[in-house]
Amino acid sequence: MISRIVFLLIIFQGSYSFSQISDSEMESLKVKWRIDLAKQANELVTKKTKQEQVSVFSDSVQRLFLKDTFIVENLLRKQLDKESSNLGINKANLACSSEYEKLVQKYYEILSAKMKDDDRELLVSWHQEWKKLMDTERVLIGKFMQETYTGGGSIHSIQYTNRLMMQQKNHLLTLIDYLTHMN
């Protein structure tokens, strides 16, 4: 019985060590995946029909958003499929959060360009406050993930990195909502 347990532990450890891939290998895979996903996203957007009662601008934003988020969310899925350890999940969540952050900036710039000068000041302030909040959130989550913190540690790291990712995604969705209701 003990020999079976030892054998299973050896098998588990061996399979665990082979499941982790290097950061450079993951980045190479993500470049390949991104190219394939961009092609798929273009096909998806091409097949999408324009909704009635939607302005040309709103339709173009929706199509661009569909393409962008298709790529980001499928990159996350592929990264999680390739590396599903706690560390792999955290890296995937943080990479996805970073991708959403880039999209937030992209759509913020579109919204800012579309707004009247008088209204833009409020948008700029709102966006700067959001960026400050996220910077503070990253530091706070970093503290909670440290082993020395008495109430946290690495056990909660997946939850924390997922929270960062979802906050960026939700902020992006807010920007998209504003944009799609403009003419």
Image (cartoon, rainbow, N blue to C red):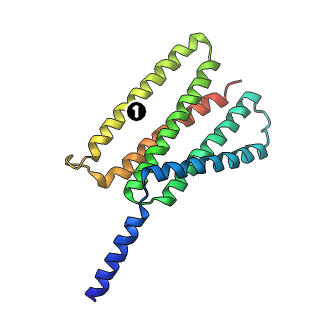
The structure residue drawn at horizontal position 52% and vertical position 34%, both measured from the top left corner, is 102
Q: Position of residue 83 (x, y in %)?
A: 46, 59
Image-based side of 45 in relation to 95, left or right: right
Residue extending farthest top: 118
Question: Looking at the figure, which quarter contains the N terminus?
Answer: bottom left
Disc 1 marks a residue whose amino acid type is Met
The structure residue drawn at horizontal position 70% and vertical position 47%, both measured from the top left corner, is 39
The structure residue drawn at horizontal position 49% and vertical position 44%, both measured from the top left corner, is 96
Q: Position of residue 94 (x, y in %)?
A: 43, 44
Q: Position of residue 158 (x, y in %)?
A: 38, 52
Q: Position of residue 183 (x, y in %)?
A: 71, 24
Residue 15 visible: yes
The front one of 171 and 65 is: 65
The structure residue drawn at horizontal position 67% and vertical position 36%, both measured from the top left corner, is 64
Residue extending farthest bottom: 1
The residue that label 1 is drawn on is 134
Image-based side of 153 in relation to 28, left or right: left
Image-based side of 75 in relation to 86, left or right: right
Indicate the quadrant where residue 144 lies.
top left
The front one of 36 and 165 is: 36
Q: Helix, strand or loop at disc 1?
A: helix
- Total number of numbered discs in the rendering: 1
Residue 166 visible: no
Against 130, is 51 above or below? below
Give neighbour class at mark 1: few <14, some 14-19, many 20+ (Cα, 10 Å): some
